[in-house]
Structures are given as structure tokens and as C-alpha cells.
Image: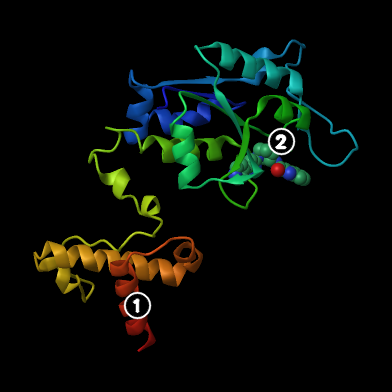
Amino acid sequence: MIKRIDVVTLLPQMFAALTDYGVIGRALQSECLEFATWNPRDFTEDKHRSVDDRPYGGGPGMVMRPEPMACAIKAAQAAAVGRAYCVYLSPQGRLVDHDILQDLLARPRILLVAGRYEGLDERLIEAEADLELSIGDYVLSGGELPAMVLIDAMLRWLPGVLGDEDSAKQDSFAQGLLDYPHYTRPEVWDDVAVPDVLLSGDHKKIRRWRLQQALGRTWLRRPELIGQRRLSDEERCLLDEYIGEQEQ
Ligand code: 9WO
């Protein structure tokens, strides 16, 4: 189980968005979990404290110098017992999914490396990173937001982080399905009524309706997720019924 998260970043202040707000902020400030940031700029030795340099081979933009990055990573690694599993966030990485989150959560320490500019010197990635991860097929201006996305998605799985102990375990992606639709008061809003079944008080019927909605919406919006998942007899039956209703 995760005990400590370190982040190497040129913009440590950005992480206040995570540490200072909400349930994730509380988790990161609790005794159970250590959190620290490391700024490569603090490990520069030249007058201008430069962290970037021109790319070999030419072309636009700048590349992060390996020396200050390596020093920051080594300092982060030395800040606690044991070695942290080192993850570099980049669009070239493997796409993050529920299984990767669980794998990271099972490690005692992780060290996230957020790049800026055009990225890190490839030799540093090869030497230090255990894994390269992407949160989606788009380029941002740095790895900080992806690092925060990863931390948020991981920490909501820790016991006690979400108010309701079961919320994370009922999480739709844990089941390999999209979520079912939610409703609250009023019973009629904007001329639209809440589905009758949710007012029936019949909890078996409600569970089946929600499962059917989750299956049906996944089939409509993310059919590849249905292909990847084996359905129980009940699920197959509920989905077939949903598809039948769609076709009418
Ligand atoms: C910028 C750029 C500018 C001109 C030509 C090529 C270029 N490539 C990049 C680029 O990929 N910059 C990255 C910015 C370098 C690594 C940190 N940055 C980053 C990470 N952007 N987006 C991510 C990211 C990480 C994880 N998941 C999705 C996006």
C-alpha cells in the first residue's frame, strides 16, 4: 500500500491545487501519507540556474538538462527509506487505466517526474524511469496536470479518503463499465420525471435497473469495453433487453 509520493517539478506551486483542497488535500496532509515536491532548479550550479538547453539536431524549443533533473530525482529517492518506483508522465507513455492505478497503489513509494518544455533528455528517462505513462492522446504544456490526475485517481482508492467506504469500490471503471445515471430531488425538474423504478423502494429492481443502464450506456458509448469484459448470464440478459428496446 502506498505510503509516500514524491514529485519532481519546475512548478511545485501547481500542486497546491491538490494539497490544499478537498478529500485529496486532506489525504496528502494526513500522517498516513507523505508528500513532497523537488524542484530541479534548486539543484542547478550555474549563475543563471538554467534547467533547459537547445536540442541536439536543432529544431524548435528546449530540452530539460539531465544534470539538475538527475540530482532532483536522486534527492527525492534519498529522502525516505526504500526505492521509489519512478514514473515519467508523457504523451509517449502507456495509457493509464484502472489496472495501472491499482499496480501503483500497491507500491510503498512512487516518484512522479513532470517535464516541461519539449521534454527530458532521453538518457535520463532510460536511466531513471521505471515506467512512462500517458493520461490521454493530447499534448499539454507540462507533466504537472497529468501527475495530479494520477495522484487524484489513485488516492480516492485509499481507505477513508472518500467519505463513503464503498464509493471507490463501486466506481464504474472498477467494474469495467461506465456509470449508471443519477437523480436527486425534485421528482420532476424541467418537465422531466425521475425514472419510476428509483421511487419504487424495490432495491432488487433498482439494482437490476442500474446494472442494465451501466451495461447499456457502455454498449452505446464505449462498445470496446463490453468486448473486453465477460458478462454474467444476468448481465447478458439485461444488455440484450436494453439493445432490444433501443432498436424499437
Ligand atoms: C512540445 C513540443 C513543442 C514543439 C515540438 C514538439 C513538442 N513536443 C512537446 C512535448 O511533448 N512537450 C511535453 C510537455 C514534454 C513532456 C512534458 N509535457 C507534457 C506531458 N505534455 N503533455 C504531457 C502529458 C503527459 C501525460 N499524459 C498526457 C500528456
Amino acid marked by disc 2: Tyr
- Residue 194 lies, in percent from the top left, at 19, 70
Residue at 22% from the left image edge and 62% from the top image edge: 183
In the displayed image of the protein, which residue is found farthest to the bottom? 248
Answer few, some or many: residues within 10 Å of disc 2's Cα (few below 14, many 20 plus, some between 14 and 19). Answer: some
Which residue is the site of mark 1? 240
Residue that sits furthest to the front in the current view: 233
- Residue 163 rendering spot, x and y as whole percentages: 24, 38
Could you tell me how many numbered marks the image carries? 2
- On residue 117, the disc is 2
Contact (Cβ within 8 Å) of mark 2 with mark 1: no
Colour mode of the rendering:
rainbow
- Distance Cα–Cα, label 2 vs label 1: 50 Å
State left or right for residue 79 relative to residue 245.
right
Q: Is residue 201 visible?
A: yes
Q: Which mark, residue 58?
A: none
Which residue does the image show at 23% across and 72% down from the upper left? 190
Residue 141 visible in the shown view: no
